[in-house]
Image (spheres, rainbow, N blue to C red):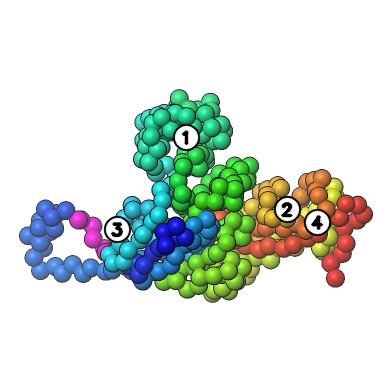
Amino acid sequence: MSSDLALRVNDVHKTYRLGLADTHLREVLMHRVRHPLQHRGVQRFKALDGVSFDVPAGQVLGLIGRNGAGKSTLLKVISRITHPDHGTVDIWGRVGSLIEVGTGFHPELTGRENVFLNGSILGMRRREIARKYDAIVDFSGIESFMDTPVKRYSSGMLVRLAFSVAAHLDSEIVILDEILAVGDADFQAKCLNKIESLTLDEGRTAIFVSHNMVPIRRLCHRVILLEHGRMAFDGDTEAALAVYLDQPGDAEGPANKATLTVTDEKGSPVHTLSSGARTTVSVLCANGSTLEGEVIVTLLASGGRPVAQYPCGKLDSREDAHPRRVKTVLAALDLQPGPHEIHAALRLPTGRLVDLATTTVDVSSNGQPTAAP
């Protein structure tokens, strides 16, 4: 069975206690002495509630769900960072995890020293790290800063270095949590290509968490949707995303989504673009939306490969904020004929990306854009 499976999660439960300001025995006893009549209620939050699934070797599994659904907790249980209250996790092979930016990095050490430290934490031998050091630095693109303490790194530089180390680990299973929410467009595309290379070319297993549906669609063979610590869906990627995007609710729900319109130079809606023509993309936020942040528009070629990315302006959640519509002009790019996808996402103040809207257009090699019917 282990030759066919990379991972088995069996009836995993995890509960956290809320509302406890002190956890040391001395502090608890002192509080009881000082306040003998005060009752301290304990609230419990069930982060995972009976989660079970198998991951075949070589599969790329996506985990999606709203904030607090249990995604990060599940990854920490799988990575052995935390232990479940009940249930088991069986793993066949070495695991390389990138769950939080800067995890396993010491702020006072240089980038060079942290490569060896982080690689050791991930299970690499010093000789192996030294052999791959040049490739790690080259992929990260921050060679000039390798002798600088990482406490002076930006969050983008940290995620570049952390992903580079994790990507060069000879692990059978790769676990990634929202790593594309920080890097710039070029590095995001580089990461996607690297993940594809690891999974498709080298046959590694991957578990991928993201609020951005573009990489989920591109990378994942299968998607699990979590709701309140339970599995709400497990199956085909498009079917899972349809269930997820149909959910009513919070700041990531469809009630707060947007509409995306593509127009030509005259302002007429179009569904076919001419390579080299100027095109305007407008994003209109839904009425009553509480979303705020910067709108990012990404142009993707067939297969989900990012071609270009454009800042589209900021949305403000205040009722009197204007405009609720933002737009950007796509540069006159030399595009290959065929279907392309235009995707709008919102970068929240926390840095996470929220899917807003997606539309598909056809690119023609010549002629003018075709008006939408």
Quarter where residue 322 is shown: bottom right
Q: Residue at x 78, y 58 (%)?
A: 339
What residue is shown with label 4?
A: 338
Q: For the point 33% across and 52% down, which residue is it?
A: 81
SS for dot 2:
loop
Q: Is residue 224 visible?
A: yes
> In which quadrant of the rendered view does residue 5 lie?
bottom left
Q: Which residues are magenta?
A: 17-23
What whole-number distance in Å separates the C-alpha atoms at marks 2 and 4? 8 Å
Q: Earlier in the sequence, mark 1 or mark 4?
A: 1
Rendered residue at 23%/68% (across/down): 42
Q: Amino acid at mark 2?
A: Ala
For residue 321, above or below residue 198: below
Label 3 is placed on what type of residue? His
143 vs 354, nearest the viewer: 143
In this figure, which residue is indicated by the disc labeled 2? 301
Across and down, in percent, residue 362 comes to 81, 59
Marks 4 and 3 sit apart, C-alpha to C-alpha, by 49 Å
Q: Position of residue 182 (x, y in %)?
A: 53, 46
